[in-house]
Image: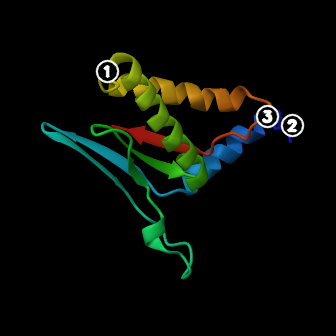
Amino acid sequence: MHFFPQHSPSGKLVQIEYALAAVAAGAPSVGIKASNGVVLATEKKQKSILYDEQSVHKVEPITKHIGMVYSGMGPDYRVLVRRARKLAQQYFLVYQEPIPTGQLVQRVASVMQEYTQSGFTAWLCTISLQI
């Protein structure tokens, strides 16, 4: 299956429109920085009575000092969480120190950009906040 960019008659990329709609339909997320730490918060929207709130993790630890929260599609977020953890581990193995937050953000952004440029993967429909 190939996911090549498709333009609408008005010239917009349809996949970007779908991704932005998925993010807009998601619950808002916020990060607040304090002098001694941060708070990541989001709303869990109950989609149905069959929805198990305990099975959904919208705020995830990446390292001891970096967390991640999202708005958008949960499965896409889980892909990013796994990649962020792997990137952080690879950095630690090379430099023997935790990855700086800014560097992890840049690397995760590169992963997201790669998904938009690949003809063999679907685009990620999520926005993440890493603190």
Viewed as shown, does residue 5 lie left or right of 126? right
Which residue, given by chain and number where applicable, does mark 1 sit on? 96
Residue at 40% x, 61% y: name it: 43
Residue at 80% x, 30% y: name it: 119
**Considering only vertical position in the picture, is 6 above or below 91?**
below
Q: Residues within 10 Å of mark 1 (few under 14, many from 20)?
A: few
Q: Quadrant of residue 92?
A: top left
Residue at 62% x, 45% y: name it: 125
Percent of width and height locating residue 20: 62, 44
Residue type at mark 1? Gln
Residue type at mark 3? Phe
Which residue, given by chain and number where applicable, does mark 2 sit on? 9
Residue type at mark 2? Pro
Farthest left residue?
A: 35
Label 3 or label 1, whichever lies nearer to me, is: 1
Between the residue at mark 1 and the residue at mark 2, the CA separation in whole angstroms equals 51 Å
Q: Residues within 10 Å of mark 2 (few under 14, many from 20)?
A: few
